[in-house]
Amino acid sequence: QVQLVESGGGLVQSGGSLRLSCAASGNIENIYSTAWYRQASGSRELVAFIQATGLADYADSVKGRFFISRDSAKSTVYLQMNRLEPEDTAVYSCGVQLVDGSLTRGQGTQVTVSS
């Protein structure tokens, strides 16, 4: 199993930046991909993901503003969020898919962007 802890959320003004962290522990060698999700009201949205190969992709709504990266030595995946907009306000959570296909998601961290 893998345990995930997110951090880095908070309140920021429109146009500002935040960096979220997703620290993994446990059977991290079995992680195939790590993703960031967000949920405001309604359904959860996939924001970005990065695979063990380094392949990454983003939702159209955040392309060019958000950047996902990882520090393998720290078992941490980051989401750098720039030019934040009020529409980015949500609870952000990270999730991992293991090589066996199983999924785990963290508790989430609140991001609030004021106008």
Image (cartoon, grey):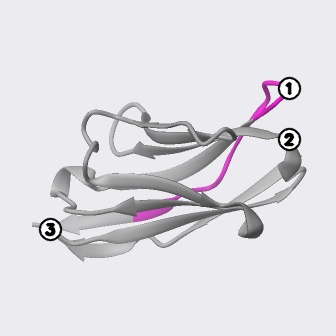
In this rendering, the label closer to the viewer, 2 or 3: 2
Give the residue at mark 2. 30
> Would you call the spot at circle 3 few (<14 residues within 10 Å), some (14-19), or many (20 or more)?
some
- In this rendering, position of residue 69 left or right of residue 111: right
Query: Please, which residue is most extreme toward the left here?
Result: 115
> Quick one: SS at disc 2?
helix
Evaluate if marks 2 and 3 touch, with contact meaning CB atoms under 8 Å apart.
Answer: no
Quarter location, residue 114:
bottom left
Q: Amino acid at mark 1?
A: Asp
Q: Find the distance from the CA under tag 2 to the CA under tag 3.
A: 37 Å
Between residues 56 and 20, which one lies in front from this camera angle?
Answer: 56
Evaluate if marks 1 and 3 touch, with contact meaning CB atoms under 8 Å apart.
Answer: no
> Quick one: SS at disc 3?
loop
Query: Please, which residue is most extreme toward the top here?
Result: 101
Q: Amino acid at mark 2?
A: Asn
> Quick one: SS at disc 1?
loop
Spot occupied by residue 48 in the image (x, y as percentages of width and height) = 45, 41
> Would you call the spot at circle 1 few (<14 residues within 10 Å), some (14-19), or many (20 or more)?
few
Q: Does the magenta portion include 107?
A: yes
Give the residue at mark 3. 15
Evaluate if marks 1 and 2 touch, with contact meaning CB atoms under 8 Å apart.
Answer: yes
Give the residue at mark 1. 100
Q: Which quadrant: the N terminus? A: top right
Q: Find the distance from the CA under tag 1 to the CA under tag 2.
A: 8 Å
Q: Amino acid at mark 3?
A: Gly
Question: Residue at (76%, 68%) from the top-left corner?
Answer: 73
Q: Which residues are magenta?
A: 98-110
